[in-house]
Amino acid sequence: MSRCRADSLLLQKKEKSMLEVILKRFEQPDEIRTFEKGRFELVRLGGMTIGRATYEPGWKWSEHVGPAAGAKRCAVEHVGMVVSGARRRRWMTAGCLK
């Protein structure tokens, strides 16, 4: 096999792997975490984890997750969107609640 042909086959193989499509659905999550007044469905795509959270009225991180985690506040960076209902958030900046 010529070097040119071998390089072409290698490039085709690389391009094929780059075009791979992964389909994941929250209806069949990789992991489900349940807690008082809430639930997380998690799907993993490569090195990324994406979650869908469902909370019942009255849910508060400080009451329903924090004590079990042994923390006063959540230290995880989040990007989120509210699909239905409403959400209220407080965060710490320079030692002050906002």
Image (tube, rainbow, N blue to C red):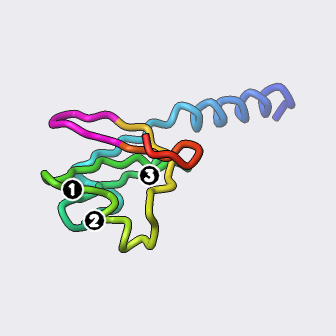
4 or 95: nearer the viewer: 95
Q: Is residue 19 above or below residue 92?
A: above
Q: Which residue is mark 2?
A: 64
Q: Earlier in the sequence, mark 1 or mark 3?
A: 3
Q: Nearer the viewer, residue 84 or 49?
A: 84
Helix, strand or loop at mark 3: strand
Locate residue 4 relative to residue 77 in the image: left or right: right
- Residue pushed farthest right? 3
Q: Amino acid at mark 3?
A: Arg
Label 1 – label 3 distance at C-alpha: 25 Å
Residue marked by disc 3: 44
User: Residue visible at 20% across and 52% down?
Assistant: 55
Residue 20 x %, y %? 50, 36
Estimate how packed mark 2 is, as few (under 14), some (14 to 19) or many (20 or more) residues with alpha carbons within 10 Å.
Answer: some
Q: Nearer the viewer, residue 85 or 26?
A: 85
Say if mark 1 contacts mark 2, CB within 8 Å: yes
Magenta range: 81-89
Look at mark 1 in the image and give the residue it sits on.
59
Alpha-carbon neighbours of circle 3 within 10 Å: few (<14), some, or many (≥20)?
few
- Quadrant assignment, res 8: top right
Residue 87 image position (x, y, % from top left):
25, 39
Residue 35 coordinates in the image, percent (x, y): 25, 67
Report crowding for label 1: few under 14, some 14 to 19, many 20 or more residues within 10 A (C-alpha).
some
